[in-house]
Amino acid sequence: MTDVRLAWIDYVLMAIYFAFVIGIGVALKRFMRSSTDYFLSGRAIPAWVAGLAFISANLGAQEVIGMGASGAKYGIATSHFYWVGAIPAMVFVGVFMMPFYYGSRARSVPEYLKLRFDEKTRALNAVSFAVMTVFSSGVSLYAMGKLFKLLLGWNEDASMLAAAGIVLAYIFLGGLTSAIYNEVLQFFLIVFGFLPLVLLGLKDVGGWDGLQARLMTHSVAQGYAPTAYTQSWAFMGDATRNPVGVEWFGLAMGLGFVLSFGYWCTDFLVVQRAMAADSMTAARRTPLIAAIPKMLFPFLVILPGMIALTVEPRPMAMPPAMATAGVGIIPAKTTEAGAVIRDTTGRPVIDYDLATPTMLAHYLPAGLLGLGLTALLASFMSGMAGNVTAFNTVWTYDIYQSYFKRDASDAHYLWMGRAATVGGIALSVATAYVAAAFNNIMDVLQLVFAFVNAPLFATFLLGMFWKRATGHGAFWGLVAGTLAAALHHGLSLPEGATVGIKGGFFGVVLPLYRSELAQTFWTAIVAWTVCFIVTIAISLVTRPRPDEELTGLVYALTPKPTEEATFWQRPGVLAVVVLTATLLLNLIFF
Amino acid sequence: MSGGIGLDIRIPIGAMFVSMGLILAGYGWLTNGIPGFYDKSLGININLWWGLAMTLFGGALLVPRWTKSP
């Protein structure tokens, strides 16, 4: 694609990173004495370490590459994923939900469901979660191989296997602690690797004002108001007037409430980091500490995509056909033979996923380029490590211990955890090859996420705050919610899409959505609502559990957590600070 | 605040940033003034400055550990 050639210095920086990553695993191996050490870091992680790992496990390729791509596609409206989505959800999980997760001493999210509801609800969640983590780690592995092939001409198989091998090595040795330590390392590396990109890019386009001015032309050319790419809320009143193609209600409910809360509050991948904290207060502070850098991430990951739209490609940087068909320095998609791919209206298909990578190639000289690419590799690896550590825990505790071997020694489960790490990585690699063979698998995965995560949040809300909710209610609510999501998806279609994986497979009955995102948000709203109603209805006709069995699991029956921390470290205080700052950010970019 | 079990997390992170930072800064110093080398980064010797920033950050993590330890 581009003329990126690495110098020796770039390889030296990468080698240093790999040495430290594996070194951490080796150094931690001798501390892994029990399964609790391996899967829960012995519940000994301080809040700031758990907090940085909490966001870093999520700061995978989907975020670094995907948010850059969305920045180029939708502009500053992409910040809704943070300032409407992630932050409020992270505050909620820290303040309200962590007392039940941490206080119940559950070792995983499915195990909490077992304690609160019943075995079948746990089984449903454990199996769907285990499958999703393996698939998602495989898909990001595939994306990594593809990207490094396109960018640097590296061999796809070799880079995929090397990355998988390194993640395997450090998790196999040091378990969750190793993953958490490396996630903190990766966090700082990603910040230091991407910050110069943003600073140089902004300097080049004349700061935020210059960027705004440059994006106006682009916005008008697309048929939107001049400031549609640089204002996040002003055009949300009407789905046709903003690049996201969604109106404020679908956004606030679908993304802000259902999808974000569903992810941050119930996904074991992130919750596991808080569960490893060294005290209840630390566990509650984990997501709140994480929210502070998370609030500022849009500047780190969205801005590069927006800048990429407005920068002139340098001559000789890419084949002329790709450059002229692209926007800014973002090239058009091409076939294997090098011809530009066009959509049904004849317009070139822009490869938005390359927005951030081309920015790296455009601005960073040898040396810093190595650092930027190492940061990119680190983001792929932290996402994968997050998935693998969540998988080995759920597999060992919720599937193997529950259904295969109930009363084995702790040493046996520790051994099984290591075996599951190897198995999980092997399955991820296999999935990566399946993803390579079928182009659609990424879309399928996103769809399954929306189907599974959205109803789950309704189950948790009712489970934690309504003591009358029963196991039968939860189980059938989840099943009904997922089916409702599938039904809504099968009856609707976004504009310009063809019937199939994008929807409409039961016949296009609903009016066309402006964008795929709008369709996803509404699918989530439908799934959540159906799960919520069905759970309540079935709970009311089934026998409730006695109060004494639910102590510590339900809000009304749990003593309020005591605040042993000093004033400014209290979860409630942190929550107010974080929410106020987020509100301000929304207003500044309104 | 030592960080989990046994190993203080600030040591590997600090050490990694100091070593990467020194190498980058050294490379920046060696390549300083080579015509065209820093065209991409708008004429700024970004390796030198960013390398120094990384070294300082890494050092800030390591120093409290040294002054405290027996």
Image (tube, grey):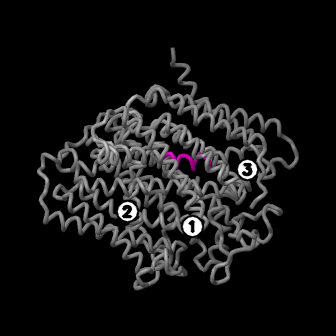
* Residue under the image location 38 percent in, 58 percent down: A128
Q: Is residue A172 above or below residue A224?
A: above
Q: Position of residue A79 (x, y in %)?
A: 51, 61
Q: Position of residue A458 (x, y in %)?
A: 29, 62
Quarter in which the N terminus of chain A is drawn: bottom right
* Residue under the image location 32 percent in, 58 percent down: A124
Please tell me how crowded label 1 is: few (under 14), some (14-19), or many (20+) other residues with Cα within 10 Å: few
Residue position marked by numbered label 3 in the rendering: A364
Name the amino acid, label 3.
Answer: Leu
Q: Main secondary structure of the magenta part?
A: helix
| Residue A423 inside the magenta-drawn segment | no
In the rendered structure, the answer to whether residue A259 lies left or right of residue A440 reads left
**Magenta span of residues:** A377-386
Q: Position of residue A507 (x, y in %)?
A: 42, 84
Residue position marked by numbered label 1 in the rendering: A438
**Cα distance in 3D space between marks 1 and 3:** 34 Å
Residue A190 - label: none
